[in-house]
Image: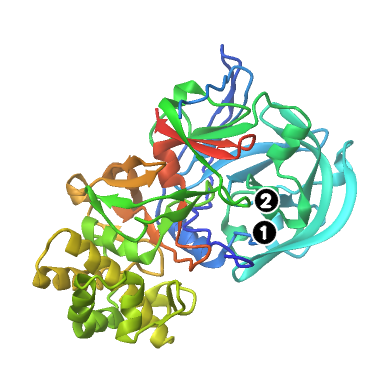
Amino acid sequence: MGQTHLLLLACFWVLSTCSLLLDASSDGLLRINLNKKRLDKEALTAAKLAKKESNLRRSVGADQYLSASTDDIVPLDNYLDTQYFGQISIGTPPQNFTVIFDTGSSNLWVPSSKCYFSIACYLHHRYKSTKSKTYTKNGESCTITYGSGQIAGFFSEDNVLVGNLVVQNQKFIETTRETSPTFIIGKFDGILGLGFPEISVGGAPPIWQSMKQQKLVAKDVFSFWLNRDPDASSGGGELVFGGVDPKHYKGDHTYVPVTRKGYWQFDMGDLIIGGHSTGFCAGGCAAIVDSGTSLLAGPTTIVAQVNHAIGAEGIISTECKEVVSEYGEMILELLISQTSPQKVCTQIGLCVFDGAHSVSNPIESVVEKQKRGSDLFCTACEMAVVWIQNQLRENKTKELILNYANQLCERLPSPNGESTVDCHQISKMPNLAFTIANKTFTLTPEQYIVKLEQAGQTICISGFMAFDVPPPRGPLWILGDVFMGAYHTVFDFGENRIGFAKSA
């Protein structure tokens, strides 16, 4: 992590045509109903391009009841459970923009009328400062890098309308250059970041911080309800500033403290597959809740086990199979003799031990490091140790243990993104559960499998993708919309904590 970028995984940046209906409901909440459309092959192609081109991640209890009667509601559009959008306005009179509400970044940006040489700007709404009575010039230049492309522009200040709240003199970016093809094919105009100030380019305050400073919200929280039913008439979801809507969750929220500001990061425990530990995060892993990530992203060591359990297609790693074939029995014997798992690969000679853990180059994905020789074998060995140790806990025989490890070598996640599964086998797949605050948060197959349309047929993909972050920032999970759809999520910036409760 550090000065690198987190991967914006499989963001399907396509917005359906929508009609707006204002609903002044009896509880005082403003709701906008939006139509939805299903994902198709063209949108999937756009998604792959977005995933390839976009590294949009700047580096650098009892439930407390929160009344929603005076909260500000921003309705969201759901594009087949893959990306959520809403509308904001900037300036006086208001200029409307469709934005992604992204807890994994902190800046607000929209295209500028001064963007002359980027096709993307001409295909989207552009902010015209000369048309706004409340515009204030700033002029500070800035650049944000995205994989193979970037945006560049300058800061301005103006009033921003979010729901029915007017945030005055909000500092935001007017983009004058958008070089990534993602911005051409995407139907969104810009991004509204909801991360912490620590990762904000140019020190611009996130919109929630401005709301707090201007005393616009009753409670220092915002909350997401993501509707995962693509055919539902109740809209794509809701983003609530200043509280929560009790109609959208069941029971109490379980809260965890933010452990590292920047992203909404916390500590989590093991991932459980069908009641069995995957081992790798049993001692703890970091996790980030990210509304700008569609799927669930985590260590290859665990995602390979998920792929095996749900029958997902994977990639065969010859290095992994070679390690299991030549060193599998030795790994097994060392673990039986109570050798520390962190030292096993060092004793075999595939890794170097620095006194705390095995060392290789930063882990990306086994299949992405084909030219890195010894690092590949070290990484494969570290994965094999976890897999074999898990099977030892299950009291499996040597033959079954080595056979299982060899099978996992054939289920490594594809670096190209999604792993397909058999739609007819969903009912037979196991439940998966994240351990958070010593409680289990279960995902059923219907919740972690994403369905999409292609040539009139339904294709099913796993909601899990591989994303490896080395110590000290990792191992790391990114809990995206697949998780947030199952669990109503509260972002409490007053108490620096995150809350989860079952979505209703």
Name the residue rendered at 54%, 40% in the picture: 17
Residue 76: image location, x then y, percent: 54, 36
Q: In this view, does 245 lie to the left or right of 323?
A: right
The residue at which mark 1 appears reads as 120
Dot 1 lies on which element?
A: helix
Dot 2 lies on which element?
A: loop
| Tag 2–tag 1 contact (CB < 8 Å) | yes
Q: In this view, does 67 lie to the left or right of 271?
A: right
Residue 10: image location, x then y, percent: 46, 57
Name the residue rendered at 66%, 47% in the picture: 196
Q: How crowded is mark 2: few (under 14 residues within 10 Å), some or many (20 or more)?
A: many
Image height of 328 relative to 216, above or below = below
Of the 4 image quadrants, the one containing the N terminus is bottom right
Which of the colour schemes (rainbow, by chain, secondary structure, one colour) is used? rainbow
Most foreground residue, 68 or 377: 377
Visible residue check, residue 363: yes
Q: Residues within 10 Å of mark 1 (few under 14, many from 20)?
A: many
Q: Which residue lies furthest to the top in this view?
A: 26
The residue at which mark 2 appears reads as 124
Most foreground residue, 422 or 121: 422
Marks counted in the figure total 2
**Residue kind at label 2, given as amino acid type:** His
Question: In which quarter of the view is residue 414 placed?
Answer: bottom left
Residue 295: image location, x then y, percent: 42, 52
